[in-house]
Amino acid sequence: MRILGIDPGSAVTGYGFVEQQGSALRHIAHGVFRLDRKLPPAARLAELQRLLLDVLQHHEPGAAAVEQSFVRPGNPHSALALAQARGVALATLAGAGLPVGEPTPQQVKRAVTGSGAAKKPQVQQMVKRLLSLDQAPVADASDALAVAICHAHQSQGGLARLPIAPRRRPSSRARAGQRWVVRRAR
Amino acid sequence: MRILGIDPGSAVTGYGFVEQQGSALRHIAHGVFRLDRKLPPAARLAELQRLLLDVLQHHEPGAAAVEQSFVRPGNPHSALALAQARGVALATLAGAGLPVGEPTPQQVKRAVTGSGAAKKPQVQQMVKRLLSLDQAPVADASDALAVAICHAHQSQGGLARLPIAPRRRPSSRARAGQRWVVRRAR
């Protein structure tokens, strides 16, 4: 099962593909769509849709997830621009016939770091580690991969059934059922 | 030149087509897309895109306009849902190769009633009158037709060059250059 994670943005949208093989996760691809800020909003959103359809066609996922967004006090304009991009991503993925998950940012952070309040560098490092990458992807692509990892965990009913560091012997705490051992064990 | 106006919503989206023939506006079609609230958000947005593509194919407009939205204090969740639908409309129209205008609600109201603070029933009545309809369309479709009318006016550089009641002899105030005579003259 190949999963596409999306971290939507009005200017930069991250994407990441992971593949679930039994109880392990394999990295397939990641990247960012950087949209031309000089384009009118409608043309920019159409470009986002075109780019998304391109990677869908190329990597053929079986499921997708798009991170939820919030209105942060103070900048409603950028929140709306983000929501517009998010709407395009949701419509494009569902229109392509994919089931689309919508994890919250907290769920995504918790899925890869064990903490819903983790900072971006921490997410980047954990994505690198969990997917055995040589280097951490840029923040937007790391976030997108984290969204895909989170979705894989949610689909499996939680990490308890999906070891995220299969090459390490679980610690005693992990064997006792504690879920987020990778970070704590090191 | 045929113009599509869109009044986007997360549950109900109004659409309206008008045709600019010289200095007159002709009503072509209008309606609403009512999306199934029981569908997941992504599926609902994909359905909105499908319905939009249907009417685009059927009526073949040469330009489009989508009303801008605002974050109203108190309900950020519904503002985000609306922005997502709006993003889908913008991407679909621009993706179909149409230039897309984005008038504000105030500009739309002013274009049909002369006042940026007009209420919905007033917009409905003016749309009915300006397009010589037998009855006023439901609010969402009236708003969409108003968006199309507004876009026609903006494309023409204002109402001064586009009489909105061509079958009536302009009043003396209109001839003197006053712009919003139809409502005031009756």
Image: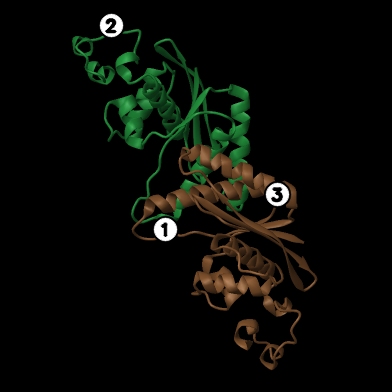
Chain colours: A green, B brown
Neighbours of disc 2 within 10 Å: few (<14), some (14-19), many (20+): few
On residue B179, which mark appears?
Answer: none
Give coordinates of residue A158: x percent, y percent: 32, 21
Q: Mark 3: which amino acid? A: Leu
Q: Quadrant of residue A152?
A: top left
Q: Quadrant of the N terminus of chain B?
A: bottom right
- Judge by depth and name the residue closer to the eye, A3 or B173: B173
Q: Chain of mark 2?
A: A
Mark 1 and mark 2 on one chain: no
Q: Is residue A11 visible from the viewing direction of this image?
A: no
Q: Residue at x 40, y 39 (%)?
A: A68
- Judge by depth and name the residue closer to the eye, B112 or A24: B112
Q: Chain of mark 3?
A: B
Tag 1 residue: B71
Dot 3 and dot 1 residues touching (CB under 8 Å): no
Tag 2 residue: A169
Mark 3 and mark 2 on one chain: no
Tag 3 residue: B56
Local SS, label 3: helix
Q: Residue at x 55, y 53 (%)?
A: B13
**Earlier sequence position, callout 3 versus callout 1:** 3
**What distance separates the C-alpha of mark 3 from that of mark 2?**
58 Å
Mark 3 and mark 1 on one chain: yes
Q: Residue at x 65, y 87 (%)?
A: B178
Neighbours of disc 1 within 10 Å: few (<14), some (14-19), many (20+): some
**What distance separates the C-alpha of mark 1 from that of mark 2?**
50 Å
Q: Chain of mark 1?
A: B
Q: Is residue A84 visible from the viewing direction of this image?
A: yes
